[in-house]
Image (cartoon, rainbow, N blue to C red):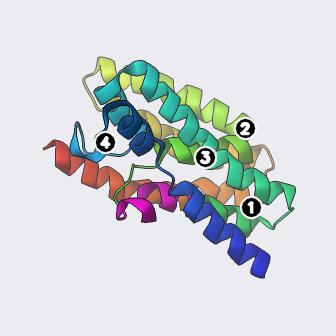
Amino acid sequence: MIRNIVLIIGAYFFGSVSFAYLVVKWKKGVDVRQFGSGNAGAANVRRILGRKYGIIVAVLDIIKGIIPVMLGFILRVPGYMIILIGAAVIAGHNWPVYLSFKGGNGMATLMGVLVYAMPGETFIAFIVGFVIGLIARSLRMPSIETGAITGYFLLPALAYYSSQPVSMVILPLILGPLLVPSRITFLNRKN
């Protein structure tokens, strides 16, 4: 019981480490949340510092999602704990204690959680979502959101049909909504 609580709390504090904030502060000496979209995530870093640094932050945020979940798998925690660890690391990214609870939107961190928990299914969902996103873009629709929603709904079906445990089938359904509040805030800032 104590180990599980430590894993969840540790995942939250690990998720609270904002690579977007640290990289922009290091390179420009400013708070990433004061520029661009106001989001402490890779896309805003790309707007401020360019593609190279945006990619670096995205990779670090994906790794941030992988490490706590990997630790959970190594320690052989039950499936519900993987869900809670994933939720904690994403919540840490979105609402980091170190930055007054104003962070990123969690998409890259969620990707890290899913890549480790269900690599094959996540890869297929990502490819399908990417293609749908490209089609949406050509139709002048929101490409990232359309692709992400497609992957979000496809992933549980892929997990089910590949005989993943029930906890992995519901993992994206439980973790996906954690992106909604920060995404709504992001869209409101743009308007």
**Whether residue 146 is visible:** no
Q: CA distance from mark 4 to mark 3?
A: 19 Å
Question: Circle 1 is placed at which residue position?
Answer: 166
> On the picture, is 187 further left or further right than 82?
left
The residue that appears at 72% across and 38% down in the rendered structure is 119
Which amino acid is tagged 2?
Pro
Instruction: Please determine whether, in this image, residue 122 is positioned above or below residue 132.
Output: below
Residue 32 forms part of the magenta stretch: no
Is label 4 in contact with label 2 (beta carbons under 8 Å)? Answer: no
Q: Horizontal and vertical percent for residue 162?
A: 78, 43
Q: CA distance from mark 1 to mark 3?
A: 24 Å
Where residue 108 appears, as percent x and y from the top left, is 51, 41
Q: Amino acid at mark 1?
A: Val
Earlier in the chain: of badge 3 and badge 2, it is 3
- Tell me the quarter of the picture where residue 7 sits: bottom right
Residue 90 in the magenta stretch? The answer is: yes
Relative to residue 159, is residue 166 depicted above or below?
below
x 67%, y 46%: residue: 66
Query: What residue does disc 4 label?
Result: 32
The numbered mark, 4 or 2, whose residue comes first in the sequence reads 4
Instruction: Say whether disc 1 or disc 3 marks the residue closer to the N-terminus.
Output: 3
Q: Secondary structure at mark 2?
A: helix
Q: Which residue is mark 3?
A: 64
Q: The N terminus lies in which quarter of the figure?
A: bottom right
In this rendering, which labeled residue sits more in front, label 1 or label 4?
A: 4
Residue in front for this viewpoint, 1 or 16: 16
**Residue closest to the far bottom:** 1
